[in-house]
Image (cartoon, rainbow, N blue to C red):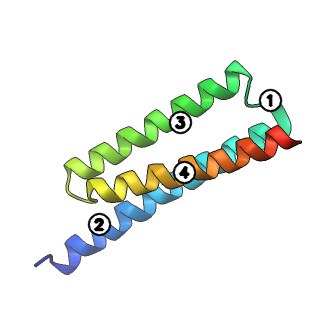
Amino acid sequence: MLSDVAVDHREKAYALLKADADKILKLIKVQMDNLTMPQCPLYEEVLDTQMFGLSREIHFAVRLDLITEEEGKQILDNLEKQLNVLHEAAQKS
């Protein structure tokens, strides 16, 4: 059974990773609204860099046993779905 401290660390790690995913979504939304369109190389570079960084954070948290691989995959999958919605909306504009 996990101690209360371990559970607290797991919850904090998940919350921090989720917050980082939300920051990426906001960054991309601002970029799409104000700066560039999804076809722009700058957009792709920012997105790739941010997604890579988040995936490394998640990998590190999994290695520390702070989150499960499935939880990490869910964070990335959810972010990708939300980014796809933004991308589709920008295409229709």
Local crowd size for mark 2, using a 10 Å CA cut-off: few (<14), some (14–19), many (≥20): some
Number of the front mark, 2 or 1: 1
Q: Which residue is mark 3?
A: 50
Q: Which mark is residue 10?
A: 2
Q: How many marks?
A: 4
Q: Are marks 3 and 2 in contact (CB under 8 Å)?
A: no
Residue highlighted by disc 4: 79
Task: Answer with the quarter of the image where residue 68 lies.
Answer: bottom left
Q: Earlier in the sequence, mark 2 or mark 1?
A: 2
Eye-nearest disc, 4 or 2: 4
Cα–Cα gap, marks 2 and 1: 37 Å
Element type where label 4 sits in the image: helix
Please report contact status of discs 1 and 4: CB closer than 8 Å, yes or no.
Answer: no
Please state the horizontal and vertical placement of residue 34, each as a whole percent of the image: 85, 38
Mark 4 crowd level (few <14, some 14–19, many ≥20, 10 Å Cα): some
On the image, the x and y values in percent for residue 79 come to 54, 51
Inter-mark Cα distance, 3 to 2: 23 Å
> Which residue has dot 1 on it?
36
- From the viewer's side, name the closer residue of 3 and 86: 86
Disc 3 residue type? Answer: Gln
First reached walking from the N terminus: tag 3 or tag 2: 2
